[in-house]
Amino acid sequence: MNDFEILLRKAGYTVPQAAQHLDYSEGHIYRWIRGEEKPREAILRLLKLEIDRIRPLYQSDESFTFIDLFAGIGGLRKAMEEAGGRCVMTSEWDKFAQQTYLANFPDNRPIAGDIREVDEYSIPDHDVLVAGFPCQPFSIAGVSKKNALGRLHGFDDETQGTLFFDVLRILQAHRPAAFLLENVKNLKSHDGGRTFEVIRRKLEEELGYTLHTRVIDAAHFVPQHRERIVIVGFREEVAFSFDEMEIPERGQRVMRDILHPEDGTEQAEGHYTTGDEAEVSPKYTLSDKLWNYLQNYAAKHRAKGNGFGFGLVNKDSVARTLSARYYKDGSEILVDRGAGRNPRRLTPRECARLMGYDDSFRIPVSDTQAYKQFGNSVAVPVFAEVARIMRPHILELSGKNKELFANLG
């Protein structure tokens, strides 16, 4: 990294912003970054003036910066903000998720869409990369061919065309102090274990990060059985350990903690609840046809010795995993309404609570989109606790960046 690139990052400019503020083309900026040309001294002075203006932000010992990739509705962002993080860039391609995200995080900057179309050098410098990236199989055909020919290959050969490639190229370009990645529990067994082995090798051996992984069940934090793998990495060796997490006893929180009380102790909200008692709208109760279908479907599979069927919960239950398909029939989590009464789906507000979002979280989309969004979200309290134990190590490593910043003169 040359002096110009260091100054550019510390000034907080992306390449397009630098081109605008310095009155040069983006081509000039890229050539200065690559060291193909040297910028005039006046350019360096302008960057140093901008650094002096924002120096107090960088010298704060209380905060760190992060980028939010595959952001969804911002669950990981909420977790990092609780630990003192400040988001400097967001990427999310789904327009409905963007709508919910902007309703809750009204940044004065646009959300980047498809991350594959985002130039890594247009992304602001940051201390932590945060991403709930999709799980995709990696092709090894091209690598095998290059090995046979005795040619060198980099991380792009195995991961090109997958969204994990975009995580890697951003990590390589920016070298943040740390990253936090989230995925489904079976990531380690996906594609016979090859997917995770590629991930591990790229992050550890090729990019030089130290890796820590753990599968955590959200049922310790919310009344929902939801196991996800958490992958934490640091640019240098630090004394991080998942054993530092404060994990409540599983099942301490049950469904009564998230269900609408329907007794007038909460205000009616939109079309979710109605009347003076704020009772759940009848629209969420299953029709006779759907309820009969689900019962018959479950009975058929029980006869075959299978476990398929609906998941009925009461106020003392811990629910199954809320999925993005919940909008279809709600079968994985149905609220028991007593003998002789059809069960009901959760309302979107109850889904939000089940994922650890408080009632100030805005839900500006249709029920169908809301169910998809909460089903795809992370359980916020789980990752808030992970972020809490990451924080001192992030600050330790970002402090080294601050020392570099201070020595720029």
Image (tube, helix red, strand yellow):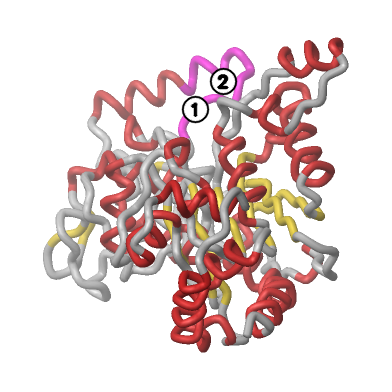
Q: Is residue 60 above or below residue 313?
A: below
Q: Residue 58 is drawn in which quadrant?
A: bottom right
Asked whether 334 falls inside the magenta stretch, the response is: no
- For the image, the number of numbered tags is 2
Locate residue 155 relative to residue 208 in the image: left or right.
left
Q: Position of residue 364 (x, y in %)?
A: 22, 54
Q: Nearer the viewer, residue 208 or 349?
A: 208
- Looking at the rendered structure, the kind of residue marked 2 is Arg
Residue 312 visible, this angle: no
Residue topped by disc 2: 302
Outermost left residue:
275
* Callout 1–callout 2 Cβ contact below 8 Å: yes
- Looking at the rendered structure, the kind of residue marked 1 is Gly
Q: Position of residue 246 (x, y in %)?
A: 71, 72
Q: Position of residue 290 (x, y in %)?
A: 29, 26
Residue at image location 56% in from the left, 20% down from the top? 302
Q: Nearer the viewer, residue 326 or 65?
A: 65
Residue at image location 76% in from the left, 32% down from the top? 198
Q: Nearer the viewer, residue 338 or 398?
A: 398
What label sits on residue 67 in the rendered view? none
Region in magenta:
298-310
Mark 1 lies on a secondary structure that is loop
Q: Is residue 18 above or below residue 397?
A: above
Locate residue 340 relative to residue 150 in the image: left or right.
left
Q: Position of residue 360 (x, y in %)?
A: 31, 70
Residue topped by disc 1: 309
- Cα separation, mark 1 vs mark 2, equals 8 Å
Q: Residue 22 is drawn in which quadrant?
A: bottom left
Labels 1, 2: front one: 1
Q: Quadrant of the C terminus?
A: bottom right
